Image (spheres, rainbow, N blue to C red):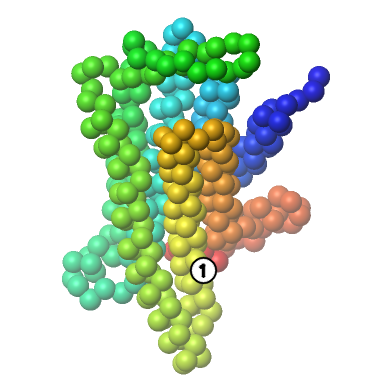
Amino acid sequence: MGFGQHEVQLYGIAVLVVIGVLWNTFNLITTMFQQWKAGGVQTVGLIISTISLGNVFLHLSTFGIVVTMWRGVLCWDDLPMFFCAMLYVWLSSSCLSFWSIAWLSVLYCVKVVNFTSELFAKIKTNISPIINVALAVTFLNSCVMFSPFFSLNYRNESYVTPVTKNTTCVIKTPLFPTWINMNLYVLVFICYLAPLPVMVMVPSSIRLVVHLCKHTLGMRKNKTDVQSADSYLLVCKLTVALVGVYITTLTTISLFYLSKLYGSDISINSLLLGYSFYCIASGVLLTISNKNLREKLWALFCGTKASNASSKSLSGETGAA
């Protein structure tokens, strides 16, 4: 039995999904096991866990949506509940992962940058509990905000498009109930998914880059504490790289939807490729930047025993080597 070009693309992307899910699952399990051994919850470990968990569900739900769309789910007589559930998981996990990166950027910025204001000094002292609360609120918002997707259903609105040469598929438009102002609701959750996290990520990342560049130059001129500065610089690179991955993914998704608005015949597989890039790249960056994850991964592939990092080391404070 031969495979068409579309099937080959789908199976190729499925390999990326497996890689992304396994990589993020490794980060999640390793980080949770480290938290359990430490006997407490560290904020950096909690953020890594939420990003990894969000990426796993994001990757799986995106692949599920693409497969069901490929199978013509919008041509069916009734909109299946499992498709609504996949949309809900897709958006919720996106929200959780995106905002976790934003909070990671804020955490590193406050920890590394020195502030003269008394208010910021107090925030710096209590930044870990603040970020923990922010993560909890983000998780609750992610669960509640997209719950209306379970009420999606077909109405009379539909349009007809040919699927193959011999068949015609009536693609129906899933809509929210009439009591939901769809335009307002979509505007709210799109802003929560895209512009707001960027408004948190970009200023904190820029502030972090400026401070660390000055700090690194000063330490190298004095030829003291260069190693410490380089370690903090790794944290900076992680934050900027994660923000870059998020913005690249956001740009890819935006181009996909804009092309659809203008009638382009771009494949939905490109959407899955964009999310695959995000999930794999963010998972790899978290592994590279975290000493414990690097050592566990090295031990997994090379069969060597990972060394135990000191709880009072810089890696325990920032998650970097």
Would residue 7 be found to the left or right of residue 61 on screen?
A: right
Secondary structure type for disc 1: helix
Q: Residue at x 40, y 27 (%)?
A: 88
> In this picture, is 181 found above or below 213?
above
Q: Is residue 306 above or below residue 52?
A: below
Pick the residue in front: 234 or 91.
Answer: 91
Image quadrant occupied by the C terminus: bottom right
* 224 vs 93: above or below: below
Q: Residues within 10 Å of mark 1 (few under 14, many from 20)?
A: some
Q: Position of residue 121 (x, y in %)?
A: 24, 69
Task: Please indicate, yes or no, whether residue 317 appears anywhere in the rendered image.
Answer: yes
Give the amino acid at mark 1: Leu
Residue assigned mark 1: 234
- Horizontal and vertical percent position of residue 182: 26, 26
Q: Nearer the viewer, residue 243 or 125?
A: 243
Observer-nearest of 38 and 205: 205
Height in image: 216 above or below 105?
Answer: below
* Image x and y of residue 10, in percent: 65, 31
Please state, as top left, top right, bottom left or bottom right, where the N terminus lies in the image.
top right
Q: Residue at x 49, y 83 (%)?
A: 225
Q: Residue furthest top?
A: 77
Name the residue: 30% across, 37% down. Answer: 189
Residue at 55 percent across and 21 percent down: it is 68
Q: Residue 15 sits in which quadrant?
A: top right
Residue 94 picture location, percent across and down: 43, 39
Q: Is residue 39 visible from the viewing direction of this image?
A: no
